[in-house]
Image (tube, rainbow, N blue to C red):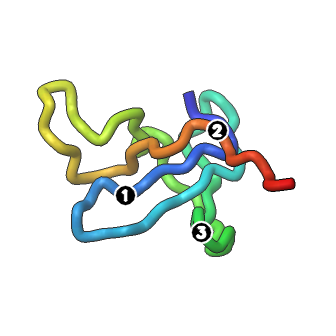
Amino acid sequence: MITPGQVYRDCDPRSSVTIRIESYRPGDARAHVVDAVTGKRFRQILAHTLHDSATTKTGKPRRTGYALVRATPEEPQP
């Protein structure tokens, strides 16, 4: 399930892109995301490219899409 605050990383091994979900309504085709580090570069991506795991059902590493890194937002430091 896609929820705001989740962090995903690009499955392409040549990329180091990480994104954070800003908003998503269940059933929508697109999720609104920003860069996970800076919080900038707002854009929309297709929700079906967001995966729970970096591996496929057969155990091979994914080469496309984004894999879940952190399911909940970090707690603010006191």
Q: Nearer the viewer, mark 3 or mark 1?
A: 3
Q: In this rendering, would 8 be left or right of 21?
A: left
In the depicted view, which residue is nearer to us: 15 or 41?
A: 15
List x then y, in percent, for residue 38: 64, 73
What residue sits right under mark 3 in the picture? 37
Q: In this rendering, would 10 be left or right of 27?
A: left
Q: Quadrant of residue 9?
A: bottom left
List x then y, in percent, for residue 76: 80, 52
Q: Quadrant of residue 2?
A: top right
Q: In this rendering, would 53 be left or right of 55?
A: right
Amino acid identity at mark 1? Asp
What residue sits right under mark 2 in the picture? 72
Q: Is residue 59 above or below residue 7?
A: above
Q: As drawn, which residue projects farthest toward the front?
A: 78
Whether tag 3 and tag 1 are in contact, CB under 8 A, the answer is no
* Mark before the other along the chain sequence, 3 or 1: 1
CA gap, disc 2 and disc 1: 18 Å
Question: Residue sitting at 68 percent across and 45 percent down?
Answer: 73
Question: Residue sitting at 69 percent across and 52 percent down?
Answer: 22
List x then y, in percent, for residue 57: 20, 25
Amino acid identity at mark 3? Val
What residue sits right under mark 1 in the picture? 10
Whether tag 2 and tag 1 are in contact, CB under 8 A, the answer is no
* Mark before the other along the chain sequence, 2 or 3: 3
